[in-house]
Amino acid sequence: MLVRTLHRGLARVHRATLRVERLLAEVAVALCPPGFERVAIDEHYDGASSYLSAQTLAAGLYPFERRALADWFPAPPARLFLPGAGGGRELLALLEHGYEVDALEPAPRLAEAARQRVAARALGARGAVRNEDLESWAARKRAGYDGIFTGWGVWSHLLRRDDRLAVLRRFREASPGGPVLLSFWRREPVFDPEERGASATGEGTSSSSGRLLSLTRHVLRGRILRLPPVEAGTIWRAGLYVHCVSEAELAEEAGLSGYRLVHYERDGSRYPNAVLVPRGVSEPPAAG
């Protein structure tokens, strides 16, 4: 009897904790002024020691990255652009494969760590790291890449559609015939394709979800704070603002930017990723 009573009490506390967690996440989204997500994202990664660990570095390219590289990208010594280099995991792996790589990393601590690791392996002749965010890079003209290989989860850090379109169009100019690898948080339900309830975005169809969104995103954010609307797919998790991507959204944005979507990972056991190629390009371009 005692165990049953304790179990029921723990279950009630757990359910209440989940509701509080959901409320805090929605309030964080509602309070976010335009542009603040970049500050929060950089602070998150600057304070995340896991991206600097030897274990992370030793992992090399993840399986989805290796598949994309083999199936869609030109062979070394092609020149690649890598936004979101983190502490250097992808960068070092690509350099050791024989690629030339220009990399960006907005978090200062991670950018410096990536630079030091490139120098320590004497790979600086083929690899460079700039401490800059992707939105700033997109505001200036860059060219001459054979492909765009974005860092792990980078695409979910562009919360606004206008920013995503601007970056995709700049990718198209910087690498006119090259593929683009994107990875992100997925908006579609992961486990059950028939699931139509609450999704990863926190934008479920239940009445309680609708009331919470109305209270936080419409009343608090729109009417009281008079901030611009939050775009669909925006969530907050433990201090990190992210955009959850859907296949339909990505296909549309790719089309508006001169690309077509040739791969979108639908397997829920794999990290969400996609590959875009420029319109008119049917096969991976050969390295020059």
Image (spheres, rainbow, N blue to C red):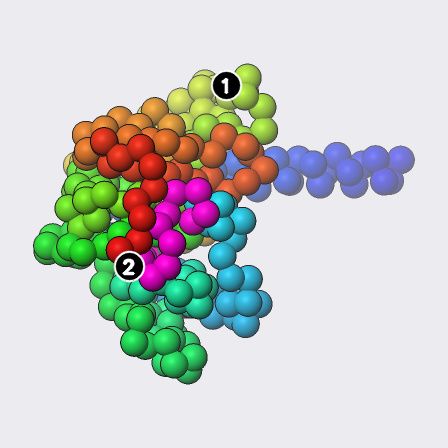
Q: Which numbered dot is residue 67?
A: none
Q: Where is residue 7 shown, x and y percent of the image? A: 78, 38
Q: Which residues are magenta?
A: 69-87
Query: Does 174 sit left or right of 55 as displayed?
Result: left
Camera-nearest residue between 184 and 197:
184
Above-or-below relation of 30 to 56 = above
Name the residue located 89 percent from the left edge and 35 percent from the top edge: 1
Q: Is residue 229 magenta?
A: no
SS of the residue under disc 2: strand
Name the residue located 50 percent from the left edge and 18 percent from the top edge: 196
Camera-nearest residue between 255 and 226:
255
Camera-nearest residue between 140 and 22:
140
Q: Separation of disc 2 and disc 1 at Cα? A: 42 Å
Name the residue located 31 percent from the left edge and 70 percent from the top edge: 127
Q: Amino acid at mark 1?
A: Arg
- Can residue 13 be seen? yes
Q: Residues within 10 Å of mark 2 (few under 14, many from 20)?
A: many
Above-or-below relation of 195 to 178 = above
- According to the picture, the residue beneath numbered tag 2 turns out to be 79
Q: Residues within 10 Å of mark 1 (few under 14, many from 20)?
A: few
SS of the residue under disc 1: loop
Q: Where is residue 55 shown, x and y percent of the image? A: 57, 67
- According to the picture, the residue beneath numbered tag 1 turns out to be 196
Query: Does 102 sit left or right of 188 as displayed?
Result: left
